[in-house]
Each structure stands twice: as C-alpha cells, then as structure tokens.
Amino acid sequence: MRRRKRGVPRLFGLLLLLYPRSFRTRFGPAMRETFAEELTDARARGRGAVVAVWARAALGMPLLALEEHGRAVGIRRSSGGHSGGMEMVDRQSRRGMWHGASLLDIKLGARMLVKYPGLTLVGVVAMAVAVALATAWWEFSSNLLNPQLPIEAGDRIVRIQNWDAEAGGPEPRSLHDFEIWQREVRTVEDLAASDNVEYRIRTMDWQFATAGGARITPSAFRMLGAEALLGRTLLESDKEAEAPPVVVIGYDLWQRLFNGDQNIIGRDVRIGRTMSTVVGVMPEGFAFPFNQEMWVAFGERAVNYGRREGPTISIAGRIAPGVSLEEAQAELGALGRRAAADYPVANENLRPRVIPYAEFEGLETTVAGVANIVFVLLLFIVCANIGTLVFARTITRGGEIALRTALGASRPRIVFQLFTEALVLTTIASVIGLAGAAWGMHRAMDLFWEVQEMRPPFWFDVSVSVSTAAYVAALALFGAAVIGVLPALKATGQQLRSHFSAGGSGGEALRFGAVSTGVIVVQVALCVALFPIAVLAGQDLLPERGLAEQFAADAYLSGRLVRDAETRPGDLPAAERQALLGRASELQAEVGQRLLAEPGIAALTFADRLPGMNHPTESYQIESDAGIPDSVATGRARTLAVDVDFLRAMGARTIAGRTFHPSDPESAANVVVIGRSFAERVLGGRNAVGQRLRYPERQDEEGVRWHEIVGVVEDPPIVTYGAGTYVGVYRPLAPGRQAAVQLFVRASSRAAALESRIHEVVESVDADLAMDGLATLEETWRPVRRTDRLVLVALGVVCGMALLLSLAGIYALMSFTVAQRVREIAVRAALGAHPRRILLSIFSRAFMQIASGVLAGALLSSLTIVDNANGAKTVAAVAALMLTVGLLACALPAIRALSIEPADALREG
Amino acid sequence: MAKTTADRATQFIPLKPPVFDILLALGEGRRHGYGIIQAIRERMGGSPRIETGPLYRHLKRLLERGLVEELDEPPAGTPDDERRTSYYGLTPLGRAVLRAEAARLADLVQETRRLGFLPARAR
C-alpha cells in the first residue's frame, strides 16, 4: 500500500538551505518529497527510527552540502586518497592563498569533524546552545527596540503623548488637547484616540467571553488603512450620542464566540450593560491599538470634562507624506507651548511628544546592548574551551603541519586552513542553534503570554528576521576565529615548529604553562561561581518536595468575581468611586454567603489575586531594633491581600502569634502575617512577631506606613504549590477597596462539577456580576508549571553543557601538559628521583591551579549568594568534581611516564 | 573514430556499491526518489540502506555523466494522487554501465568460486 505524503518540517528546509542554490533548485522539491516519505515510513516503525532518520539527515546533509559547494565552484578532487587533499591545498596556496583553497579547506574541515566525533559532538552541542541563547536574546531585544508594525507604511504611524515633565510620565487624560490637535495639526493625519477597556461580551444564547476591547475614534481605521473582513468598520456617525450602539469584533473573537458564523453581521450582543449590534469583523491579525479584539465608537467630548479630567486615552496618527518625525514634533511642541500659556494651571508641565508607535520604553538600548555583550562573552567562553580542545588536537597533528611547512605552505596559509576547519564546525553549530532558537522562542513566548494572561501586542513577532540570520553568521565567524585562529597561531609559533622539526621527540620542551594555568583558573572559577546561582534558581522553580501529594489542586476552583461597569472606578470622582466599590464589596459578601450554602462547597474565601499567576514582587524594609529601616532586612517579596478567613480556610498552621481577626481590615494598626519561608530567609532566628515592616514604594496621604507583624504561618500549600515560590507577606483584604476579587472554593466532591452552579449563583445575585476564568487550580496553573519546566530544562542544559565543556577542557589541558613532560619525568625517575616525589610535584601543580580557581570562584559567588547552605554545598561539589577530573587527567600520563624503563628513557632522552 | 556505448561504459567501471544499487533499482523501470530507496532496501532485506541526502548526491553525478535521465512522467498506470515531482530512468549508457559492472562482478564471483571460496554451482 502506498502511504500518504506528510508535511516536511521546517528543519529539513533549513538543512536544504545549506546546499548551493543550483542544487536546491533542481533537487530540493524531490528531496523534500523523498524525506517526507522516509519519515512516514520511520514513524510506522517507531520513535527510534524517526530519531535515526533525523540524526542521519542532520549530521550527513551539512557535509554533503559542503561537498556540493566545493564542486559548484569547479574544484575537483584529483587524487582519490583521503590524505591527498593536503598537497593539493599547498599547490593551490602557491597560486594564491585566498583563491579556491578555502573550498578544499572546507572539505578537510568536514573530514576533521568525522575523524574526531567526540570533539565534534561536544563542540557542536556547546556552541549550538550558546548561539541559541545569543540569537534568542538578539531577536527578542530587536523586536522590542526596533518593532515593525505589520501594516503598510507602518513606520509612519506614531503615538502622541502629553508628557508630564513634573510627574515624569505621560498624562493620559488629554481629551481637550486631543480635540485641538485633531483640528489644527497638519503634520500628522487621521489622529485617533482610544481607550482600552476589558469587556465582557454575551451573546443572546448566553455564551460569554471576556475580551480586551477599545473605545476608539473611527479615524483609527482610516489611519491604518484597515478594512473589515465582513461588514464594515466604525463610522463617524457611530460616535453620535443618539446613534444605536454598534461593535466591530476581531477575527479570533469571532471564531471563539461565534464559531466563525458568516451571518454574524446584524446580530445583537450584550457588551457590559449595553445591547449592541455587530456591524463588522476585522481580518486576522488586526488588534489595534495593542492586542484588542473588539471596538466600539469613542464618542466622548472634551466639553463634558475639565482639563486633565475624563477618560484615559492614547493617541495615534499617521505622519503626513513628506513630513519627518522632527517636523511633526516641532508642530506639536509649538501647540504644547501655546496650551501652556493659555492654561497655565493644567498645561504648564505638559510637553507633547511624537514617538514611533510601537516604541517600547521598558528596555533601553544600552541595557539590551550590555546583555548582548554578555551573551557574546558566554559564546567566547564556550569557544575558548572548544579552542583548548582543538589546540590539543592541533598539537597531535604536528607532523602534518611540519610536513606542510616543508612543502612550502606559509604560516598564514596554515592558520587560514585551521580557521576554515573551525568555521565548518561553527557553521553547523550555528545552524542548529538558530533552528533551536527559532523553535524555543515561539514556544517560550506562547507560554509567556499564557502565563501573563494576555495576548501579545499585534506587532510582536519572534520569527527569525534577516538581521538575526546575519547576526548568527557573524557569531559563526567570531566563534571560528576564537576556536581556530588562536590555537593555530599558538600551534604554528616558532617554539612549536622547532619542536616539530626536532621530530617531536622532546628536544625542546614545549611550554605554554602560563596560558594553560590562566585558562584552567578562569575555567574553574567561573564554574564554581556560576553553578550555585543556577542551582538556587532551579530550586526556586521546583515546588517543595511532596507538596504535589499534599495539595490536591484539582479540588479547588478559582475565578475572578467581576462586575460589568460602564466606567473604570479609577476614572470616577472620589465619591462615586467609593459608592461603586462599596456596592462591589456588598455583592462579594453576598456571593460568598450564597455559595457557602450550596452543597458540595466545603470552604470559600477571597484574595486580591491568584498566587502564582504573574504575581509581582514589591520592595520592603524591616525595622531594625534602632527603629530605622534595617539595611540587611531589605528586599523584594510577594504580598497577597487576603480575606480574614483565607489562611484558616487554606489550612495554614499558625507557628507564632496569630492570624487575622475580623477587626483587622478596618483597624488602624495595619497588621500583617508572614509566611515561614519568608521569616526564615529574612529574619533568620529573630522572633518575627512584633517586628515592623513597610513598603517604601507604597505611599498614601500619611506617607509610608509601618505594618506590624502579628503572626507567622506555615506557608499554605495553595500558595507555595501554585507560585512555585513563596508569598512572603499577607495583609488583610479590606472590603470596599477592590472592584474585583479572586474567589477560591474548596470542593467536598468533584470540583469541576460545581462550575456551572457557581456561574448560576453569581449571576442570580446580580445580573452584572460574573465569574471570569473559573477553573480548577490544576488547569489554571498548568501553563505556569510548563514554563517552570521549560526554564528548568534550559537551565539544566546550559549548566550541563558548561560543566561538560569545562571538564573536557581541563582534562585536555592537564593531560596534555603532563604528557609533554613524559620523557622528562622518565629521565628524572631514571636518575633516581623517588616516584612519590615526582607524582607530588605533578599533582601539586594541578592542585594549585584548581585550588586558585576554586578560591576565586568562591569569592565571586560569595558576592552574589549570602548565607545559603545549598550554595556552599554546590560550591564544594563543583570544586571536588573539578579536582577529581584534574588529578585524573594528570595521573594517567604520569603513571605512563613512570612505567618507562629507565634505560630506554636515558637512551632516547 | 567514435567510441561505442560499450566502450564508454567501461570508463565508469568499477562502480561504488551505492551507485550500483541505484542503477540496479532503475534497471527495473523508472522510479521516483523514495521508490529507489525502497527498492534498495527490499533487495537488502531491510538494511543497509541509503538516505535522502546521499541518494540525491549520487543522482546528481549520474545525471551529469549521462547514466540516468530525469523524467516528468510517472510509469504508466500511476494514479494521479501518487504522482511525484521527478522520476528517474536509465539512459542507454546507464544500461551499458550496469551491464558492464554486472559482468565484472560475475567474473569476480566465478574467480572466487574457482579458488574454492564459494561452493561449486549445483548442476
């Protein structure tokens, strides 16, 4: 039976890219077809067969591709022998070093890879990982620094901010200025304002979804040149107060909520509290202004508000043809100065700014640059290590190099050949690294947005760009220079050549002691310094042992209790805001009571958020005995505002002091309870109860407040399990402070079965209330766990690679230096030196080198890790491993030297 | 004087084993790339085998030397949904080379048998 063809993965396409274009054009399609069938066939035989097919393709095709490149330029092998290449290289070198010879060098390089599979494997894997990391960061940071809007002439779309020079941030309440700019500005066209709102949308058959939406001026669609996929976009007439409410929805929402219904136009939906008609569906990928999925007309007028009041808006526009960003800035600047003169109270400190639309201010060019340098430095360290191994190999090829020199090859010619050989290795590693980065970036970013519970901005795209490919090519060249040129210069130096000309019999001792000592010390120091950091980072990601068994995440349901509102509380005047929040908290309490009366619900409580999901840390200070902030007990911790019942309901045992009393939220005492891990890490053995803590960044009318620690609790499993790390501080959740709270329900039977009942109860309390994202904690936390696992695996791979490479490097260097002294050792033994004395001299040197490295590394790590038993253990373990490998590397050649017969040693020496 | 096809064929002898395998697979009729791999594998009883990369490397050389030709049309009777991008078949020179290599191998077998390393053929 003939099998059906299957799609060929992108990796094979990348492998094909290695071939010359002419070959690819002629055979590429047929090769794809054939490989797809090979894969299909292998799948039928099992996973092992698939891996084998991929391994053979990944290892074999780059070499075949190199051969084709050689042929493509017309260099034909004149001699069939495998060593024949060498004389050919030199013959060519006489014709011109840089012409043609490199193609044969490539071939020789490919042969070297096959001849030394161990070195190839270590080198390719290590370099591929380093290239993948550097590439991923490059792609990610260039996405943030030089974002490209995926629309026509996207570079002309700008954002206009009213920068508040006093507050150091944009003033989003700029409706008055927006209207003036819309009338008067000539350098920026189709000015549009939008106000982002989280909408709850319900269909008439009670399907509902929460979606990021925007109230937006219809001019935005003109500015972007965007047209609807179905129906129409918003019109100026939709803005009028008496116009019927309409909505335009995004492609994904259309698929998600309406299953891509072609008859969607004209259907009614409820958005918040308003019935609206769907008038359009936007094409896939349209998500202006950021990641929105639905758009309603923005009809607010400045006349209804005072200056610097009203909705928070963001403003965008398209730079007019033939106008530069600077000219637009000049015009807006002039209008800003005029407004400051006309309305000094409101506008004195406001400075309009015109910036590229997708500019991201969270990452500075210098920071990104420094990070790039760090990754290149990492690559350098990796390459220096591989270079060490290559150097050892080059020494073993001393005979070949001497012969080539005798045949007339110049030193630069030989160095160039060794560089090209290294380039073959780094090219293969870079292609693999690039493929790995492309795959890993997509996976990591998908997980990132899932954990952040948001959609990415519409212009964010981590596919490999041309600049990234060029960057990888540059990394390959850089790597080859480090791996090939430095060892080649060393190996072809005067000292070494005279060594080889003496037949390599040790006539002149080969000394590169200072270099090797330096490399070993740095190597060991870096490993010792960096490993404990990695181990501690990994530990933070691992949930506490045994917790998974203790805590049944599928017995808990959690969701956000939200209330549809026309306006965000923050946009309201203080009195109205207070009334709204007061009503919200009454409703929260009622939902709690009604749900507790339901069968199947064993416990119920609230908190301000779900621990573990995008939970930021805040800086804190702990008061010292002297009453001032303790400089040591300062750091960042996660804080959770919880219902007074939360800790009890979640089974957190009180270790010291007390948990919350019902009077705590309203009391002026500002009490907090801390978790055990936090108490141990921050306060050590001190008694926590009675100490005071404050958040320097949290300031209200009374300044920064102190909070008294009234109790220490065992970290509740729900918190440690979900967060993967700990919440430090719990403070009481005050009613009437939050419009939305996170509800936690512990089920006495199957949690999932309660979901629909909870929705019903919530909606029966108030038609505007709803539960958002209600799911078992098991489901909710799944992406967090996947992210943690991914980070752990990545950390493990990087650390494993670094350790392996370091050990290989140290082993090669040490055994090489001792092997160089074999004859000297044998002669010393022949002259009567005691073997113990000889061994002692060899080992003491190795010991000193490694010990210096350990000492330097321990010093470095003590700067980053304070008082951590695991850190110290890791330092000790890494040091012991390095020492063992180092001594072993010395022992083998030393024992060999001692076993040489004294008479032989004296005769040959 | 122009060389005959048989004379030209001897220039290519001896063949590398994978090249002989490919020519032999095409000796049965035109095939697409994966068809060649399958034919070789079946003849070898499952393994050893040749993969996509090396196969096309050899095919390129064979095409350049005029031993194999590339055809757009599949063998008669191939259903439309089983059509492939390219098919390959032997040229007259390719047939001659295959024949010459087979004769060389047969001579070798005969010589091996004469020396007693193979049992005499049953009569």
Image: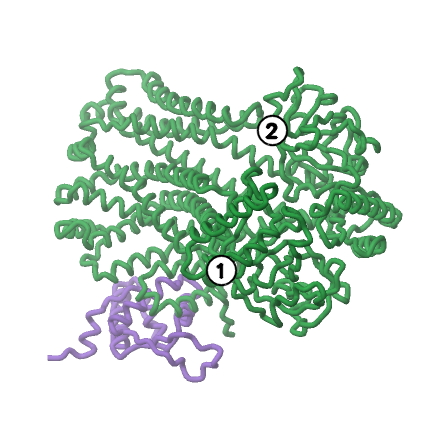
Chain colours: A green, B purple
Quarter the C terminus of chain A occupies: top left
Question: As drawn, which residue projects farthest toward the left?
Answer: B1
> Where, by quadrant of the figure, is residue A802 drawn?
top left
> Where, by quadrant of the figure, is residue A849 drawn?
top left
Please give left or right for residue A58 compared with residue A312 in the image.
Answer: left
Q: Are marks 1 and 2 on the same chain?
A: yes
> Is tag 1's residue or tag 2's residue first in the polypeptide sequence?
1
Q: Residues within 10 Å of mark 1 (few under 14, many from 20)?
A: some
Of the numbered discs in the image, which one, if any, rests on residue A150? 1
Please give left or right for residue A363 compared with residue A251 in the image.
Answer: left
Q: Nearer the viewer, residue B81 or A559?
A: A559
Q: Which residue is mark 2?
A: A635
Q: Is residue B73 above or below residue A249?
A: below
Q: Is residue A404 above or below residue A23?
A: above
Q: Position of residue A702 (x, y in %)?
A: 70, 29
Question: As drawn, which residue projects farthest toward the bottom?
Answer: B76
> The residue tagged with tag 1: helix, strand or loop?
loop
Q: Amino acid at mark 1?
A: Pro
Question: As drawn, which residue projects farthest toward the front?
Answer: A342
Q: Amino acid at mark 2?
A: Gly
> The residue tagged with tag 2: helix, strand or loop?
strand
Chain of the residue on which disc 2 is drawn: A
Looking at the image, can residue A552 be seen? no
Looking at the image, can residue A418 be seen? yes
Q: Nearer the viewer, mark 1 or mark 2?
A: 1
Of the numbered discs in the image, which one, if any, rests on residue A320? none
Q: Which residue is rendered at x = 49% and y = 51% of the image?
A: A332
> Where, by quadrant of the figure, is residue A66 drawn?
bottom left
Chain of the residue on which disc 1 is drawn: A
The reply to whether dot 1 and dot 2 touch (C-beta < 8 Å) is no
Q: Which residue is rendered at x = 35% and y = 62% of the image?
A: B54
Q: Position of residue B123 (x, y in %)?
A: 34, 75
